[in-house]
Each structure stands twice: as C-alpha cells, then as structure tokens.
Amino acid sequence: MNVEQLRRVLANLPGDMPVVVEDSKMGWMQNAALYVAPAHIDHCVSGNYLHASHRDDADNCDALLMSGFGQSDEDFVDISPQVARLSVIDAEAEAEAEAEAALYETQDAIHSKRPD
C-alpha cells in the first residue's frame, strides 16, 4: 500500500473515526491491510480506552484497524486497496493496430488532396 492508495480509502471514512494499529514484533510491513472494525470506548479518569467489539451500555463506534495479520471476524470489513494487476500487452498486435491507423490517416490525407 502506498500513500495515494491510503488517501483514496480514507476519503470515504468519517473524520472522527478512531484509528487502531495492531502491534506486532514482526517489524514494519508494506502489505498491511485496513479494516473497519466494531469497537467501544471506555471513558475513564485517566483517559479514554478503545476496545474491540461493541458492548452493551458502552460508547460503541467503528474504528479503522491497520493490521499486518489477516482478520477473519465477520464483523470486520476489509477496505484495503486492491492491488493493481499488471496486464500483458501484446506489442505485436498493438504495433499492427498503430500501423493500420497510420495507413488510414495517410489514405484519408491523399483522398482529401485529390481534386474531384
């Protein structure tokens, strides 16, 4: 994932959505996934704490989860940007199409210069 892909994904999320980064000892990961996950906030004297899943009588919300681990919980919505697949270009067919288009342009130019 790169910054441009992240911007496109985040553009549709509410600005006040909390963000959670799943901690791991594996180091940095380029292929981290993004999920919208159910969460709840506990308001305490020492601060607010965000916890996974909704709970009765809690300040329930959704949170953006950035995780390097695959999440299988059915309540989690995967919003990771899709990886663009490289397409194979048939260079020979493309060259033939360009040559044919050039030929038609040349023929049109010749016909337009001929007197009627």
Image (cartoon, grey):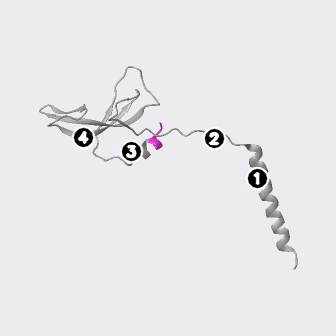
Amino acid type at mark 2: Ser
Query: Which residues are the magenta region?
Result: 1-5
To which quarter of the image does residue 26 belong? Answer: top left
Q: Position of residue 65 (x, y in %)?
A: 34, 34
Q: Which of marks 3 and 4 is in front?
A: 4
**CA gap, disc 1 and disc 4:** 55 Å
**CA gap, disc 1 and disc 3:** 40 Å
Q: Does residue 51 appear to the left or right of 29 in the view shown?
A: left
In the displayed orientation, state which residue is furthest to the right. Answer: 115
- Dot 2 lies on which element? loop
Q: Where is residue 85 in the image (x, y as percent from the top left)?
A: 57, 39
Whether residues under marks 4 and 2 lie with C-beta atoms below 8 angstroms apart, the answer is: no
- Dot 3 lies on which element? helix
**CA gap, disc 1 and disc 2:** 18 Å
Query: For mark 4, what is the residue?
Result: 61
Q: Position of residue 115 (x, y in %)?
A: 88, 78
**CA gap, disc 4 and disc 2:** 40 Å
Label placed on residue 50: none
**Quarter occupied by the C terminus:** bottom right
Query: For mark 1, what is the residue?
Result: 97
- Dot 4 lies on which element? strand
**CA gap, disc 3 and disc 4:** 17 Å
